[in-house]
Image: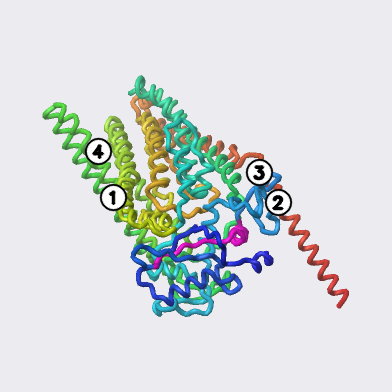
């Protein structure tokens, strides 16, 4: 690798812009000069050794810079970030520059060996790892303090000097992807490998899960239709349907782990080593020494953080949960009013009025979920978590608890307090359908319409700018920098999680829930694809090996659904009639069945391996080879040492 770095030049004639850096207007000249120098400086001098070029806009302001890198620099960067690529013998290995010739499709003149998304990920990694050396502050901004080892880009972002960093779209590749992905209505699989090449593994894995989940719900939907049509009140038959759903939900979640392993092995992320986590950008504290790395960085008392969590965050979440229950009781008052109104008038209008409270409540639930999300983000940020993973886990826990109660509390109340199965069916259907329509509108249709309006205005402004050769890139950057920023897959997974709850928690009451879920997900695939390609800036690729904490969330939901369905079936008049003398026998029977079903679920989860046999063998082989290589290195070192001792 050393030979590579020493010959690496920072000037390349065929400059290919990959990443855009936008600085705040009026940024001081000395700051720009210092920052750009650090970007192009050699690695040995603490620089990133990248290429940078200012983009002059129509008003002559130079606050936007294009960043690229030479082919050699990107190959060396691929080794630094630990990218895994396919070898000529079809095995997957971590890329190293010294063994580059052993990798499939590698050639010194093949600039497509690394995908554009991988190149942009490497540049992002190198920019984020630009660290302060002896500087005590950002030149020109004494209030923006620095210390040795502090990430320069993170300090520039938190100080407001750096507005944003984003990867550029590849117009030609995007056009091809749009055509194969959603350009024509077809029955078939999504081009997941193409999505991964363009957007990275995290987004490709979400679309893979969405597609898989949709296909997996089809058997539940197909079986649910005849149950809805022919056996509306016959709970004996619902026992079979509910049992199938509960076991099927376990099978689909376990099989997903296997599919996920197949995909991520093929993409190389299953083998990627987890890098040491740096403190997140928003983390602050007094300067101290990290006991693990020995580096100087902000230190914040974990006791203070725990105080903030338990004395502020926890009471706030409990207060929000109480408010959610209070709104639910108002909904039941409205429901009663609509029922009384219908009894008095008995007209078509009064029949329609029966659905109005549920629709209003569904809209209120969505509004409350969104407001609470902002509050949860603010609180979790205020808790001052050191690591991004810790921040995400606390945020997901807060949001899941509130969303679960907010969306499902009314259904639990109707089922287990009011014992009104007709109202439960009506509420479940209304909540499910209304939330799906609102989500489609708020997440895709509205942003798409707003973006289209902005693009039309921008094109009119750029028409007079056809003089220099950079006009097309200037137009592209101008359009893309104003696009919305994609905030990750959190909301998309959350929507699927809540949908899974509607389908599985009360499956024995409303068999059509799976049908509506399948129909929604088919349109969701197209609207989310449209959103990624047309509405948002291109996000940086993020390597990942699985869907993370969401797998656990879905599995937890399937366990809760066993309990709810067993109780619902136990409450049915038909089952109740089987135990006329002793209600205790009924309770014990329901508890026994529920425990048996849970046991079957856990046995199935244990029996179905998380990774297919061939992938397990490949991983074991790689581990063996790496251990053998390590042994050889140790032996070579020992021999050298022995040789030196003899000659000494």
Q: Is residue 595 visible?
A: no
Q: Is residue 367 visible?
A: yes
Q: Residue furthest right?
A: 646
Residue bearing mark 4: 358
Residue nearest the viewer, comparing 544 with 155: 155
Instruction: Estimate the spatial distance between the alpha carbons at disc 3 and disc 2, rounded to whole Å.
Output: 23 Å
Residue bearing mark 1: 368
Mark 4 burial class by Cα count in 10 Å: few <14, some 14-19, many 20+: many
Residue bearing mark 3: 616
Residue nearest the viewer, comparing 369 with 618: 618
Query: Mark 2 falls on what kind of element?
Result: helix
Q: Residue furthest left?
A: 344
User: Quick check: is 416 in the magenta stretch?
Assistant: no
Query: Mark 4 falls on what kind of element?
Result: helix
Q: Is residue 79 left or right of residue 160?
A: right
At a point 45% along the width and 52% down the height, the residue shown is 169
Residue 102 - label: 2
Q: Residue 567 at what x, y percent from top left?
A: 39, 34
Q: Earlier in the sequence, mark 3 or mark 4?
A: 4
Q: Which residues are magenta?
A: 62-82
Query: Where's the C terminus, which quadrant?
Result: bottom right
Q: Quadrant of residue 9?
A: bottom right
At a point 41% along the width and 69% down the height, the residue shown is 304
Q: Is residue 353 left or right of residue 212?
A: left
Query: Mark 3 falls on what kind of element?
Result: helix
Mark 1 burial class by Cα count in 10 Å: few <14, some 14-19, many 20+: some
Instruction: Estimate the spatial distance between the alpha carbons at disc 1 and disc 2, rounded to whole Å.
Output: 55 Å
């Amino acid at each position: 690798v050393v030979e590579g770095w020493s010959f690496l030049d920072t000037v390349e004639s065929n400059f290919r812009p990959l990443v855009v850096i936008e600085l705040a207007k009026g940024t001081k000249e000395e700051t720009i000069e210092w920052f750009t120098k650090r970007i192009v400086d050699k690695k040995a001098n603490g620089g990133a050794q990248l290429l940078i070029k200012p983009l002059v806009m129509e008003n002559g302001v130079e606050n936007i810079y294009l960043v690229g890198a030479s082919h050699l620099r990107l190959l060396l960067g691929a080794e630094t970030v630990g990218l895994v690529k396919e070898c000529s013998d079809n095995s997957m290995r971590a890329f190293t520059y010294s063994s580059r010739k052993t990798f499939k499709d590698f050639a010194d003149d093949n600039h497509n060996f690394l995908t554009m998304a991988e190149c942009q990920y490497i540049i992002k990694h190198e920019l984020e790892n630009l660290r302060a050396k002896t500087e005590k502050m950002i030149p020109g901004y004494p209030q923006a303090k620095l210390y040795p080892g502090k990430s320069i880009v993170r300090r520039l972002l938190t100080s407001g000097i750096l507005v944003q960093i984003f990867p550029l779209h590849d117009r030609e590749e995007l056009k091809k992807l749009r055509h194969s992905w959603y350009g024509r209505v077809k029955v078939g699989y999504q081009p997941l490998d193409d999505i991964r090449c363009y957007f990275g593994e995290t987004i490709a894995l979400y679309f893979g899960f969405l597609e898989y989940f949709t296909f997996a719900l089809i058997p539940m939907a197909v079986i649910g239709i005849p149950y809805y049509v022919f056996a509306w009140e016959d709970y004996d038959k619902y026992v079979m349907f509910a049992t199938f759903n509960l076991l099927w939900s376990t099978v689909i979640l376990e099989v997903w782990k296997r599919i996920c392993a197949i995909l991520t092995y093929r993409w190389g992320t299953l083998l990627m080593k987890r890098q040491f986590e740096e403190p997140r950008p928003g983390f602050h504290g007094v300067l101290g020494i990290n006991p693990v790395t020995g580096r100087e960085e902000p230190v914040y008392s974990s006791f203070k953080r725990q105080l903030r969590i338990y004395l502020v965050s926890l009471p706030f979440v409990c207060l929000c949960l109480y408010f959610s229950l209070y709104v639910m009781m108002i909904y039941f008052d409205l429901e009663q009013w609509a029922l009384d109104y219908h009894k008095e008038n008995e007209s078509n209008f009064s029949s329609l009025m029966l659905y109005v409270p549920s629709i209003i409540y569904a809209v209120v639930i969505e509004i409350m979920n969104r407001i609470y999300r902002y509050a949860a983000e603010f609180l979790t940020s205020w808790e001052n978590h050191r690591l991004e993973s810790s921040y995400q886990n606390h945020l997901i826990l807060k949001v899941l608890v509130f969303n679960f109660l907010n969306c499902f509390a009314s259904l639990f109340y109707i089922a287990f307090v009011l014992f009104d199965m007709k109202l439960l069916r009506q509420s479940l259907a209304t909540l499910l359908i209304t939330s799906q329509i609102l989500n489609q509108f708020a997440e895709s249709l509205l942003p798409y319409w707003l973006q289209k309006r902005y693009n039309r205005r921008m094109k009119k402004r750029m028409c007079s700018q056809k003089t220099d050769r950079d006009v097309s890139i200037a137009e592209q950057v101008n359009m893309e920098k104003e696009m919305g920023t994609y905030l990750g897959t959190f909301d998309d997974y959350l929507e699927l999680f809540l949908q899974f709850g509607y389908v599985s928690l009360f499956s024995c009451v409303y068999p059509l829930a799976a049908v509506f879920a399948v129909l929604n997900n088919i349109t969701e695939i197209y609207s989310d694809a449209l959103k990624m390609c047309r509405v948002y800036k291109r996000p940086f690729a993020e390597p990942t090996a699985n869907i993370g904490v969401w797998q656990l969330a879905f599995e937890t939901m399937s366990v809760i659904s066993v309990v709810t369905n067993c109780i619902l079936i136990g409450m049915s008049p038909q089952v109740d009639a089987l135990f006329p003398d002793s209600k205790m026998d009924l309770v014990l029977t329901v508890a026994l069945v529920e425990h048996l079903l849970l046991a079957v679920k856990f046995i199935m989860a244990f029996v179905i391996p998380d990774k297919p046999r061939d992938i397990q063998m490949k991983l074991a082989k790689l581990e063996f080879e790496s251990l053998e290589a390590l042994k050889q290195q140790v032996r070579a070192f020992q021999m050298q040492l022995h040789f030196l001792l003899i000659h000494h």
